[in-house]
Amino acid sequence: MQSSTILSVRNVCKTFPTRGGGVEALRDVSFSVARNELCVLLGPSGCGKSTLLNIVAGLHTPTSGSLSLEGRPIHGPARERGMVFQSYTSFPWLTVLENVEYGMKLNGIPKAERRERALHYIGLVHLTKFRDAYPKTLSGGMKQRVAIARTLA
């Protein structure tokens, strides 16, 4: 029988070095996420939630412990994992549509396919009327939906 675990985090620790020795951000964090399961990280500001997400995304490495996605170790960023950051990450000189297409363009996806995908995900986040708008004209929530559409695309 095949395991339904898609993400495994085992004994992950993260210490950020400082002049005085270090700041422990995570200590022995372990959990698994099954396919189609929703997992929530909940805790006060500064407890390490974003640090853990950055490690899962491959943007930081753990000081110790291990992570795997579908049984493969996580070592650095990869296309099968996306991240929507807390701060707004859209390029101000690109429209909503161009922002959503951007990552696909970097990955060499043909223009017609990336346009179709971008329009699909823009529709899913209910921004079709704003596809030609620039980020400065969007609300904070709309900017986050652009980031979500870009990540999904």
Image: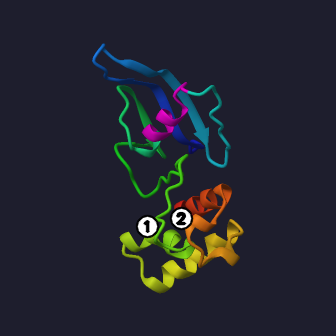
Q: Residue at the spot x=56%, y=81% of the render?
A: 116
State the residue lying farthest toward the top: 20
Residue 153 in which image quadrant: bottom right
Between 102 and 137, the residue placed more toward the observer is: 137
Q: Residue at the spot x=48%, y=66% of the render?
A: 92
Residue 97's place in the image compared with 87, above or below, is below
Between 135 and 37, the residue placed more toward the observer is: 135
Q: Is residue 137 left or right of residue 14?
A: right
Q: Look at the numbered disc 1 and give the secondary structure of its residue.
A: helix
Tag 1 and tag 2, C-beta contact below 8 Å: yes
In the image, which disc is placed on residue 123?
none
Residue placed under numbered mark 2 in the picture: 150
Q: Mark 1 is on which residue type?
A: Gly
Q: Residue at the spot x=57%, y=65% of the render?
A: 136
State the residue lying farthest toward the bottom: 112
Residue 21 in which image quadrant: top left
State the residue lying farthest toward the left: 19
Q: Which residues are the magenta region?
A: 46-55
Residue 20's place in the image compared with 127, above or below, is above
Residue 121, x across and y down, in percent: 62, 70
Residue 111, x across and y down, in percent: 45, 84
Q: Residue at the spot x=55%, y=46% of the render?
A: 86
Q: Mark 2 is on which residue type?
A: Arg
Residue 14, x across and y down, in percent: 40, 25
In the image, which disc is placed on residue 103?
1
The quarter in which the N terminus is drawn is: top right
Q: How is the image coloured?
A: rainbow
